[in-house]
Amino acid sequence: MTYDITNNNKNIFDNQNFVFGVEPEFNTRTYTEMNRINNNSAEPIKGLEYVYDGSRVDGEGRLPILSNSLASYKYLRSVLEQLQENGATVNWTCSVHIHVSRRPIIIDPTEFHNRSIEYTRRTGSALPSSNGTDYFGDAIPLEILKDIGYRVSKNKDQFNSFLAPSRIDDGGYANNAMRRARQPNGYFCKMPLSHTMIRNTEPTWNKLKRVISTGDKYSAINIHHWSNKETIEYRSHGGTLEIDKIWSWIQFLINMTRHSINARHSQVQSVIDTPDYIGRSYRTRQSIAYQLMRRVGGATTQEIMDATGIQTAQRVRSMISEQIRPVLRQRFGRDILITHNQQHYNHAYSTSQGRYDLNGYEIPLQVNNASGGCVFANNGRTDLLSGLIDQHKRHLKPFRN
């Protein structure tokens, strides 16, 4: 089993630690019974609520937002075990809905898990992605959503091969109970229109909704939460209480997003001038040092000392690391300051005699800055399993109910 590691980048091309919500449906036990069981247990599962969703099932679990971490895997497993141990079952009426966040997290996945559980326990709501930059990075654009819909439609048979017959949108009836209920297969998870129509659709939310979320809310790919919850909801998976099936399905869905970003799109790049100075004015020590460094070749530590009146190389290093470098990192999202050794300035080894004043620093006049936009590269495979590890592929085979 592989889990995400901490990634502080906000850009989706550099960070794809997407988080997710899970809604497992069940029968036999009512949601009120399951809430009572959980609340009265010796160790209640924090942040968990069982609710009635208005469909044919007896209830569904409403979990906090989870991350791709061991902590979240264990949390989800504990929910499913609680349902199984207390007599909950699944059949053709049930499904597992997965919400995949549009934004990656920029903190440690286990830390996010703990904060999410606590937030939901305290408020009764899911941790919003609009919480701010402390937790979440940039959102995937509509171009990525369009490509996901295109790939699912183009590989419809492959996608359907992972589903129970009752979840395949083919107009038939997987069993007599469905026929008596007049509920055809895939009634609550309508597939997108043809991949050709999706390919020719302008990537706006209203236009993509018509060709991807064809069943309105009851679509295999439901994009009605694109703006408010900032998620893509996938509704096709059949009901199950098996952790490995659900976890592998989650990884499959996240992997589809990652592949559409990494293999099928290129990042829009722009060239940005670095600022003429930093701080309040041109005259501060920081700005004087900054202006010296912001030239071709940069400036030696000794040049900075002479221009600013700073007495030692150590104090120059401290000013750069504590006052200049953080400002640039915050503005550009990465470290752009270049460090040069004394040989760069044509000084031989030991020339500085241990004073470290002949090394230097350079700030480029311009930097390439990656925007949040992307363009279709059309050079990656459309296959839905591209990039998914074999362990998760093995668990995609569904129950045939």
Image: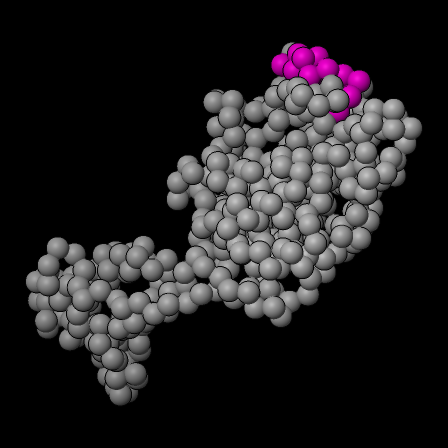
**Is residue 46 among the parts visible in the rendering?**
yes
Residue 179, magenta (yes or no): no
Residue for point 66% across, 31% down: 23
Instruction: Name the foreground residue: 70 vs 276.
Output: 276
Q: Report x, y in % for residue 144.
A: 56, 55
Compared to 130, does 266 lie above or below? below
Picture quadrant where residue 401 is located: top right
| Vertical comparison of 86 with 295: above or below | above
Q: Nearer the viewer, residue 337 or 184?
A: 184
Q: Nearer the viewer, residue 111 or 93?
A: 93
Residue at 73 percent of width and 15 percent of height: 30
Query: Foreground: 173 or 229?
Result: 173
Q: Is residue 272 left or right of residue 29?
A: left
Tell me how many marks there are: 0
Most common secondary structure along the magenta stretch: helix
Q: Determine whether, in the image, residue 372 is placed left or right of residue 159.
A: left
Side of 338 where 277 appears, left or right: left
Furthest toward the right, the residue is: 176
Q: Point out residue 312 in the picture as x, y percentages from the top left corner.
A: 16, 66
Instruction: Locate residue 328, reporting x and y percent.
Output: 29, 60
Residue, x 26% and y 80% (percent of image)? 297
**Residue appearing at x 66%, y 23% in the figure:** 53
The chosen color scheme is: one colour
For the record, the magenta segment spans 26-39
Tell whether 196 sits left or right of 305. right
Mark yes or no: residue 85 visible.
no
Residue 16: x and y, percent?
Answer: 54, 53
